[in-house]
Amino acid sequence: MTFKTTLAAIAAALAATTGFVAAPALADHHMEKKADVPTVGGAPMYPTKTIVENAVNSKDHTTLVAAVKAAGLVEALSGPGPFTVFAPTNAAFAKLPAGTVETLVKPENKTTLTAILTYHVVPGNVSAAQLIDLIKQGGGKAELKTLNGAILTARVEGGKVVLTDAKGGKATVTQADVFQSNGVIHVTDTVSLPG
């Protein structure tokens, strides 16, 4: 029995006994059909690459990538994880007051920037289906403890997952379940801000 076959058997057993659904089995990206790979910002998001390796290719996430670099989080988000990242687009960052991003990426604001970015990351690999189940189990909301330590509250509104931040701001998940080798990305339309 090969390693991949063993992993598939373990995943199947987990799914059968716990209801947990694992991310799709990872294959060498040379064997993947491009049509089977989701795209974000016009770039394929290969499930064999890390969150950072994929995000750097998305034309919709150049601001997020620059912020991750400025905060010194590249190495952490390239690690094994797994991580669930709610990834705001460039348009989401553009909604912030003028000059906010330019101010945040300055070295003297690294602590604040890091706090904001880690507020978009939840430990573990939480798929959209699992998130919706957590919302149902929570009576209509799920409180997600972020790497920042603060809570993001998820609800389903108008058939979409909406995150409410500590300041009452709302971000809608516009693209879910972009699986990576070290987690999953859910694209959002607004930057969430910790309290």
Image (cartoon, rainbow, N blue to C red):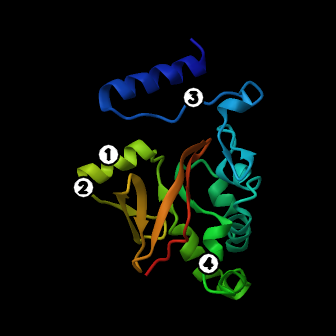
Q: Residues within 10 Å of mark 2 (few under 14, many from 20)?
A: few
Judging from the image, what secondary structure is the residue with disc 3 in? loop
Real-space Cα separation, disc 3 to disc 1, in angstroms: 22 Å
Label 4 sits on residue: 113
Residue visible at 35% across and 48% down?
A: 132
Real-space Cα separation, disc 3 to disc 2, in angstroms: 29 Å
Label 3 sits on residue: 25
Quadrant position of residue 96: bottom right
Judging from the image, what secondary structure is the residue with disc 4 in? helix
The kind of residue on which mark 3 rests is Ala
Q: Residues within 10 Å of mark 3 (few under 14, many from 20)?
A: few
Of 56 and 112, nearer the camera is: 56
Mark 2 or mark 1: name the one nearer the start of the chain: 1
Judging from the image, what secondary structure is the residue with disc 1 in? helix
The kind of residue on which mark 2 rests is Gly
Q: Is residue 88 visible?
A: yes
Marks 4 & 3, CB-CB < 8 Å contact? no
Front label number (2 vs 4): 2
Label 2 sits on residue: 138
The kind of residue on which mark 4 rests is Leu
Q: Which mark is residue 133?
A: 1
Looking at the image, residue 66 sits to the left or right of residue 122; the answer is right
Quadrant position of residue 38: top right
Residue visible at 57% across and 28% down?
A: 25
